[in-house]
Amino acid sequence: MTPVASKKVRNIHADLRERVLACEWQQGETLPTELELAERFGCSPNTIAKAMALLAHEGLVERRARAGTRILRNTPATEPASSHTGEGGVELDAFAFIYPSEQHEGIRRAVQGFQAAAHERERRAVMLTTGSDYRKEAEYVSRLSEFHVRGAVLYPNVRVPGDLAALSHLLVSARFPIVLSSVNLLGMGCPAVTVDAFHAGYTMTRHLLKQGLREIGFFSNRAGSVSMRDRYMGYRQAMEEAGLPMPTERVFLEPVMNPDYADPLREPTELARGYLAQARGVEGVVCNTDFLALGLLRAAREIGIRVPHDLRVTGIDDYALASQGDIGLTTYRVPDELIGRRAFEVLEERVRNPRGPIPEIQLRGEIVVRESA
Protein backbone atom coordinates (compact mmCIF):
# COMPACT_ATOMS: atom_id res chain seq x y z
CA MET A 1 0.00 0.00 0.00
CA THR A 2 1.30 3.45 -0.90
CA PRO A 3 2.55 5.30 2.19
CA VAL A 4 1.14 8.70 2.98
CA ALA A 5 2.90 11.80 4.35
CA SER A 6 2.10 15.47 3.86
CA LYS A 7 4.52 17.83 2.17
CA LYS A 8 5.13 19.55 5.51
CA VAL A 9 6.04 16.25 7.16
CA ARG A 10 8.36 15.29 4.30
CA ASN A 11 10.14 18.65 4.45
CA ILE A 12 10.70 18.41 8.21
CA HIS A 13 11.80 14.80 7.86
CA ALA A 14 14.35 15.79 5.21
CA ASP A 15 15.67 18.63 7.39
CA LEU A 16 16.00 16.44 10.48
CA ARG A 17 17.55 13.62 8.47
CA GLU A 18 20.20 15.97 7.07
CA ARG A 19 21.02 17.18 10.58
CA VAL A 20 21.32 13.62 11.88
CA LEU A 21 23.61 12.59 9.01
CA ALA A 22 25.67 15.75 9.57
CA CYS A 23 26.18 14.61 13.19
CA GLU A 24 24.45 17.62 14.72
CA TRP A 25 23.35 15.04 17.28
CA GLN A 26 25.80 12.20 17.91
CA GLN A 27 24.95 8.51 18.19
CA GLY A 28 23.38 7.85 21.60
CA GLU A 29 22.31 11.46 22.15
CA THR A 30 18.67 12.41 22.71
CA LEU A 31 16.95 14.78 20.30
CA PRO A 32 15.03 17.82 21.51
CA THR A 33 11.46 17.09 22.57
CA GLU A 34 8.62 17.16 20.07
CA LEU A 35 7.34 20.38 21.67
CA GLU A 36 10.74 22.04 21.29
CA LEU A 37 11.07 20.94 17.67
CA ALA A 38 7.51 22.01 16.94
CA GLU A 39 8.33 25.50 18.18
CA ARG A 40 11.53 25.53 16.10
CA PHE A 41 9.77 24.46 12.90
CA GLY A 42 6.57 26.41 13.54
CA CYS A 43 4.27 23.39 13.35
CA SER A 44 2.28 21.06 15.61
CA PRO A 45 3.84 18.32 17.79
CA ASN A 46 1.83 15.82 15.76
CA THR A 47 3.65 16.88 12.59
CA ILE A 48 6.99 16.44 14.35
CA ALA A 49 5.90 13.01 15.60
CA LYS A 50 5.17 11.89 12.04
CA ALA A 51 8.54 13.12 10.83
CA MET A 52 10.23 11.33 13.73
CA ALA A 53 8.38 8.16 12.78
CA LEU A 54 9.95 8.32 9.32
CA LEU A 55 13.41 8.64 10.88
CA ALA A 56 12.62 5.67 13.13
CA HIS A 57 11.48 3.65 10.13
CA GLU A 58 14.84 4.33 8.48
CA GLY A 59 16.59 3.07 11.58
CA LEU A 60 18.24 6.42 12.34
CA VAL A 61 16.50 6.98 15.67
CA GLU A 62 14.75 5.04 18.40
CA ARG A 63 11.65 6.39 20.09
CA ARG A 64 10.74 5.39 23.62
CA ALA A 65 7.82 6.48 25.75
CA ARG A 66 8.92 8.90 28.50
CA ALA A 67 12.58 8.55 27.41
CA GLY A 68 12.51 10.63 24.23
CA THR A 69 14.05 10.01 20.81
CA ARG A 70 17.63 8.72 20.72
CA ILE A 71 20.07 8.69 17.78
CA LEU A 72 20.92 5.13 16.71
CA ARG A 73 23.39 6.03 13.99
CA ASN A 74 24.62 8.94 11.85
CA THR A 75 24.88 7.03 8.59
CA PRO A 76 22.07 6.04 6.21
CA ALA A 77 21.05 2.42 5.81
CA THR A 78 22.68 0.62 2.88
CA GLU A 79 19.22 -0.19 1.59
CA PRO A 80 16.81 2.54 2.71
CA ALA A 81 13.41 1.39 3.85
CA SER A 82 11.82 3.81 1.42
CA SER A 83 13.06 1.72 -1.50
CA HIS A 84 10.60 -0.95 -0.38
CA THR A 85 7.78 1.02 1.15
CA GLY A 86 7.91 4.35 -0.58
CA GLU A 87 8.47 7.79 0.83
CA GLY A 88 6.71 8.54 4.07
CA GLY A 89 6.97 5.37 6.14
CA VAL A 90 4.72 2.34 6.57
CA GLU A 91 0.99 2.87 6.13
CA LEU A 92 -0.68 -0.09 7.86
CA ASP A 93 -4.16 1.31 7.31
CA ALA A 94 -5.22 -0.75 10.34
CA PHE A 95 -7.51 -0.41 13.34
CA ALA A 96 -6.12 -1.51 16.71
CA PHE A 97 -7.78 -3.06 19.73
CA ILE A 98 -5.80 -2.59 22.96
CA TYR A 99 -6.93 -4.64 25.97
CA PRO A 100 -5.55 -6.23 29.16
CA SER A 101 -5.94 -9.98 28.49
CA GLU A 102 -8.01 -12.49 26.52
CA GLN A 103 -8.04 -14.67 29.65
CA HIS A 104 -10.89 -12.44 30.75
CA GLU A 105 -14.01 -13.87 29.11
CA GLY A 106 -15.81 -10.56 28.65
CA ILE A 107 -12.77 -9.03 26.96
CA ARG A 108 -12.37 -12.09 24.76
CA ARG A 109 -15.97 -11.78 23.59
CA ALA A 110 -15.52 -8.07 22.81
CA VAL A 111 -12.33 -8.84 20.87
CA GLN A 112 -14.19 -11.46 18.84
CA GLY A 113 -16.92 -8.97 17.99
CA PHE A 114 -14.33 -6.38 16.94
CA GLN A 115 -12.47 -8.91 14.76
CA ALA A 116 -15.68 -10.11 13.12
CA ALA A 117 -16.64 -6.55 12.19
CA ALA A 118 -13.13 -5.86 10.84
CA HIS A 119 -13.26 -9.02 8.73
CA GLU A 120 -16.64 -8.08 7.27
CA ARG A 121 -15.35 -4.62 6.35
CA GLU A 122 -12.09 -6.07 4.99
CA ARG A 123 -10.16 -3.88 7.40
CA ARG A 124 -6.81 -4.95 8.83
CA ALA A 125 -6.94 -5.31 12.63
CA VAL A 126 -4.06 -5.16 15.12
CA MET A 127 -4.67 -6.78 18.51
CA LEU A 128 -2.45 -5.77 21.46
CA THR A 129 -2.55 -6.98 25.07
CA THR A 130 -1.23 -4.90 27.96
CA GLY A 131 -1.47 -7.34 30.86
CA SER A 132 -2.02 -5.77 34.27
CA ASP A 133 0.32 -2.81 33.63
CA TYR A 134 -1.82 0.15 32.61
CA ARG A 135 1.34 2.06 31.58
CA LYS A 136 1.59 -0.17 28.52
CA GLU A 137 -1.64 1.37 27.25
CA ALA A 138 0.07 4.75 26.99
CA GLU A 139 3.13 3.21 25.40
CA TYR A 140 1.12 1.36 22.76
CA VAL A 141 -1.01 4.39 21.91
CA SER A 142 2.05 6.62 21.56
CA ARG A 143 3.95 4.12 19.39
CA LEU A 144 1.08 3.10 17.11
CA SER A 145 1.12 6.48 15.39
CA GLU A 146 4.58 5.62 14.08
CA PHE A 147 2.98 2.86 12.00
CA HIS A 148 0.09 5.00 10.80
CA VAL A 149 -2.58 3.03 12.61
CA ARG A 150 -5.79 4.86 11.81
CA GLY A 151 -7.41 4.57 15.23
CA ALA A 152 -7.86 2.30 18.23
CA VAL A 153 -10.49 0.78 20.47
CA LEU A 154 -9.27 0.77 24.05
CA TYR A 155 -10.50 -1.52 26.81
CA PRO A 156 -8.87 0.35 29.73
CA ASN A 157 -7.19 -1.44 32.59
CA VAL A 158 -8.57 0.69 35.43
CA ARG A 159 -7.92 -0.98 38.78
CA VAL A 160 -7.61 1.88 41.27
CA PRO A 161 -8.90 5.48 41.22
CA GLY A 162 -5.45 6.84 40.33
CA ASP A 163 -5.53 4.93 37.05
CA LEU A 164 -8.34 7.22 35.87
CA ALA A 165 -5.96 10.20 35.86
CA ALA A 166 -3.50 8.30 33.67
CA LEU A 167 -6.32 7.26 31.34
CA SER A 168 -7.52 10.87 31.06
CA HIS A 169 -4.04 12.03 30.04
CA LEU A 170 -3.79 9.21 27.53
CA LEU A 171 -7.06 10.18 25.83
CA VAL A 172 -6.12 13.86 25.66
CA SER A 173 -2.65 13.24 24.20
CA ALA A 174 -3.57 10.54 21.66
CA ARG A 175 -2.70 11.41 18.05
CA PHE A 176 -5.51 9.39 16.48
CA PRO A 177 -9.15 8.59 17.29
CA ILE A 178 -9.81 6.36 20.29
CA VAL A 179 -13.07 4.64 21.23
CA LEU A 180 -13.55 3.24 24.73
CA SER A 181 -15.00 -0.27 25.00
CA SER A 182 -17.02 -1.43 28.03
CA VAL A 183 -15.67 1.44 30.16
CA ASN A 184 -16.58 5.11 29.89
CA LEU A 185 -14.87 8.22 31.21
CA LEU A 186 -17.28 11.13 31.34
CA GLY A 187 -16.22 14.62 30.31
CA MET A 188 -13.28 13.54 28.13
CA GLY A 189 -15.03 13.90 24.77
CA CYS A 190 -14.22 10.30 23.88
CA PRO A 191 -16.72 7.97 22.19
CA ALA A 192 -17.66 4.92 24.25
CA VAL A 193 -19.64 1.71 23.79
CA THR A 194 -20.74 0.08 27.04
CA VAL A 195 -23.47 -2.02 28.59
CA ASP A 196 -26.45 -0.13 30.02
CA ALA A 197 -25.14 -0.63 33.54
CA PHE A 198 -28.07 1.12 35.23
CA HIS A 199 -30.47 -1.27 33.50
CA ALA A 200 -28.36 -4.24 34.64
CA GLY A 201 -28.40 -3.22 38.31
CA TYR A 202 -32.07 -2.29 38.22
CA THR A 203 -33.11 -5.51 36.45
CA MET A 204 -31.32 -7.82 38.89
CA THR A 205 -32.69 -5.98 41.94
CA ARG A 206 -36.23 -6.10 40.56
CA HIS A 207 -35.80 -9.83 40.02
CA LEU A 208 -35.12 -10.35 43.74
CA LEU A 209 -37.92 -8.00 44.76
CA LYS A 210 -40.42 -9.97 42.66
CA GLN A 211 -39.47 -13.05 44.69
CA GLY A 212 -40.66 -11.31 47.86
CA LEU A 213 -37.23 -10.43 49.28
CA ARG A 214 -36.87 -7.22 51.27
CA GLU A 215 -33.39 -7.39 52.83
CA ILE A 216 -31.38 -7.02 49.63
CA GLY A 217 -27.73 -6.01 49.59
CA PHE A 218 -25.28 -4.81 46.96
CA PHE A 219 -21.72 -6.13 46.59
CA SER A 220 -19.16 -4.36 44.36
CA ASN A 221 -15.48 -3.72 43.78
CA ARG A 222 -14.01 -1.03 41.49
CA ALA A 223 -16.97 0.97 42.73
CA GLY A 224 -15.60 4.32 41.53
CA SER A 225 -15.84 3.50 37.84
CA VAL A 226 -18.76 4.88 35.85
CA SER A 227 -20.04 1.45 34.84
CA MET A 228 -19.93 -0.02 38.34
CA ARG A 229 -21.50 3.06 39.89
CA ASP A 230 -24.34 2.99 37.35
CA ARG A 231 -25.07 -0.63 38.37
CA TYR A 232 -25.26 0.53 41.96
CA MET A 233 -27.57 3.41 41.03
CA GLY A 234 -29.87 0.90 39.29
CA TYR A 235 -30.00 -1.08 42.53
CA ARG A 236 -30.78 2.08 44.53
CA GLN A 237 -33.56 3.08 42.13
CA ALA A 238 -35.29 -0.29 42.42
CA MET A 239 -35.00 -0.31 46.21
CA GLU A 240 -36.32 3.26 46.52
CA GLU A 241 -39.27 2.45 44.27
CA ALA A 242 -40.06 -0.46 46.59
CA GLY A 243 -39.78 1.81 49.63
CA LEU A 244 -37.08 -0.36 51.20
CA PRO A 245 -34.05 0.73 53.26
CA MET A 246 -30.47 0.11 52.22
CA PRO A 247 -28.47 -0.31 55.46
CA THR A 248 -24.79 0.52 55.04
CA GLU A 249 -23.71 -2.90 56.35
CA ARG A 250 -25.44 -4.52 53.36
CA VAL A 251 -23.93 -2.21 50.75
CA PHE A 252 -20.30 -3.02 50.02
CA LEU A 253 -18.50 -0.59 47.66
CA GLU A 254 -14.82 -1.53 47.43
CA PRO A 255 -13.03 1.12 45.30
CA VAL A 256 -10.13 -1.10 44.18
CA MET A 257 -9.95 -4.17 41.95
CA ASN A 258 -6.87 -6.37 41.51
CA PRO A 259 -7.72 -8.82 38.72
CA ASP A 260 -6.03 -12.20 38.70
CA TYR A 261 -6.63 -13.68 35.27
CA ALA A 262 -5.21 -17.05 36.36
CA ASP A 263 -7.46 -17.25 39.44
CA PRO A 264 -10.34 -14.78 38.98
CA LEU A 265 -12.22 -15.94 42.11
CA ARG A 266 -9.40 -15.44 44.60
CA GLU A 267 -9.98 -11.77 45.43
CA PRO A 268 -13.81 -11.95 45.12
CA THR A 269 -13.90 -14.81 47.63
CA GLU A 270 -11.76 -12.86 50.09
CA LEU A 271 -14.01 -9.82 49.76
CA ALA A 272 -17.13 -11.99 50.09
CA ARG A 273 -15.98 -13.42 53.43
CA GLY A 274 -15.78 -9.90 54.82
CA TYR A 275 -19.12 -8.94 53.31
CA LEU A 276 -20.99 -11.90 54.81
CA ALA A 277 -19.46 -11.15 58.21
CA GLN A 278 -21.00 -7.67 58.21
CA ALA A 279 -24.25 -8.14 56.23
CA ARG A 280 -26.27 -9.84 58.95
CA GLY A 281 -29.80 -10.90 57.95
CA VAL A 282 -29.34 -10.25 54.23
CA GLU A 283 -31.74 -12.33 52.12
CA GLY A 284 -30.42 -11.60 48.65
CA VAL A 285 -27.40 -9.87 47.11
CA VAL A 286 -26.98 -8.10 43.78
CA CYS A 287 -23.33 -8.57 42.83
CA ASN A 288 -21.66 -6.19 40.42
CA THR A 289 -19.96 -9.00 38.47
CA ASP A 290 -20.21 -12.76 38.04
CA PHE A 291 -16.82 -13.20 39.69
CA LEU A 292 -18.04 -11.43 42.83
CA ALA A 293 -21.22 -13.51 42.82
CA LEU A 294 -19.28 -16.77 42.44
CA GLY A 295 -16.92 -15.69 45.20
CA LEU A 296 -19.97 -15.02 47.37
CA LEU A 297 -21.34 -18.52 46.65
CA ARG A 298 -18.00 -20.02 47.67
CA ALA A 299 -17.76 -17.96 50.87
CA ALA A 300 -21.38 -18.77 51.80
CA ARG A 301 -20.73 -22.49 51.40
CA GLU A 302 -17.72 -22.23 53.72
CA ILE A 303 -19.88 -21.04 56.63
CA GLY A 304 -22.91 -23.21 55.94
CA ILE A 305 -25.17 -20.65 54.27
CA ARG A 306 -27.37 -22.49 51.77
CA VAL A 307 -28.06 -20.92 48.38
CA PRO A 308 -30.82 -20.31 47.41
CA HIS A 309 -32.58 -21.48 50.64
CA ASP A 310 -30.87 -19.06 53.05
CA LEU A 311 -29.46 -16.56 50.57
CA ARG A 312 -30.15 -15.67 46.94
CA VAL A 313 -27.34 -14.38 44.78
CA THR A 314 -27.25 -12.70 41.36
CA GLY A 315 -24.39 -11.61 39.13
CA ILE A 316 -23.85 -9.46 36.06
CA ASP A 317 -21.90 -10.78 33.01
CA ASP A 318 -23.03 -14.38 32.23
CA TYR A 319 -19.56 -15.86 31.90
CA ALA A 320 -19.12 -19.59 31.30
CA LEU A 321 -18.37 -20.18 35.00
CA ALA A 322 -21.88 -18.97 35.85
CA SER A 323 -23.41 -22.23 34.55
CA GLN A 324 -20.66 -24.68 35.45
CA GLY A 325 -20.85 -24.94 39.25
CA ASP A 326 -23.08 -27.02 41.52
CA ILE A 327 -25.41 -24.05 41.73
CA GLY A 328 -26.07 -22.22 38.48
CA LEU A 329 -25.78 -18.44 38.83
CA THR A 330 -28.70 -16.19 37.97
CA THR A 331 -27.12 -13.29 36.11
CA TYR A 332 -27.48 -10.51 33.54
CA ARG A 333 -25.91 -11.34 30.18
CA VAL A 334 -23.75 -8.45 28.98
CA PRO A 335 -23.64 -8.34 25.14
CA ASP A 336 -19.83 -8.20 24.97
CA GLU A 337 -19.60 -9.40 21.36
CA LEU A 338 -21.99 -6.66 20.25
CA ILE A 339 -20.04 -4.10 22.28
CA GLY A 340 -16.87 -5.02 20.39
CA ARG A 341 -18.66 -4.90 17.04
CA ARG A 342 -20.26 -1.54 17.71
CA ALA A 343 -16.96 -0.14 18.99
CA PHE A 344 -15.41 -1.01 15.62
CA GLU A 345 -18.27 0.74 13.80
CA VAL A 346 -17.95 3.85 15.95
CA LEU A 347 -14.19 3.93 15.36
CA GLU A 348 -14.68 3.56 11.62
CA GLU A 349 -17.06 6.51 11.58
CA ARG A 350 -14.74 8.54 13.81
CA VAL A 351 -11.84 8.01 11.42
CA ARG A 352 -14.05 8.99 8.51
CA ASN A 353 -15.40 12.08 10.27
CA PRO A 354 -13.16 13.21 13.19
CA ARG A 355 -15.27 16.30 13.82
CA GLY A 356 -18.57 14.43 13.91
CA PRO A 357 -20.75 13.70 16.96
CA ILE A 358 -19.18 11.92 19.93
CA PRO A 359 -21.52 9.04 20.72
CA GLU A 360 -22.02 7.22 24.00
CA ILE A 361 -23.74 3.96 23.11
CA GLN A 362 -25.28 1.87 25.88
CA LEU A 363 -26.42 -1.64 24.97
CA ARG A 364 -28.88 -3.62 27.05
CA GLY A 365 -28.52 -7.27 27.95
CA GLU A 366 -30.99 -9.73 29.43
CA ILE A 367 -31.50 -11.74 32.60
CA VAL A 368 -30.54 -15.43 32.65
CA VAL A 369 -32.32 -17.25 35.49
CA ARG A 370 -30.62 -20.23 37.17
CA GLU A 371 -30.67 -21.90 40.59
CA SER A 372 -28.97 -19.22 42.73
CA ALA A 373 -32.02 -16.92 42.56
Image (tube, rainbow, N blue to C red):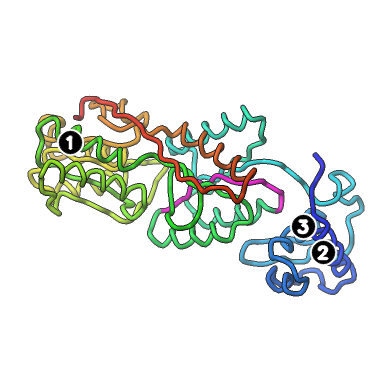
User: How many neighbours does mark 3 have within 10 angstroms: few (below 14), some (14-19), or many (20 or more)?
Assistant: some
Q: Label 1 is placed on what type of residue? A: Arg
Q: Position of residue 157 (x, y in %)?
A: 46, 50
Q: Position of residue 184 (x, y in %)?
A: 43, 49
Q: Nearer the viewer, mark 1 or mark 3?
A: 3
Upstream in the sequence, badge 2 or badge 3? 2
Q: Is residue 213 left or right of residue 168?
A: left
Give me the C-alpha separation between circle 2 and circle 1.
Answer: 67 Å
Q: Label 3 is placed on what type of residue? A: Ala
Upstream in the sequence, badge 2 or badge 1? 2
User: How many neighbours does mark 1 have within 10 angstroms: few (below 14), some (14-19), or many (20 or more)?
Assistant: few
Q: Which residue is mark 3?
A: 56
Residue at 44% across / 43% down in the picture? 182
Numbered circle sitting on residue 301: 1
Numbered circle sitting on residue 12: 2
Give me the C-alpha separation between circle 2 and circle 3.
Answer: 14 Å
Q: Which residues are magenta?
A: 146-158
Q: Which quadrant holds residue 231?
A: top left
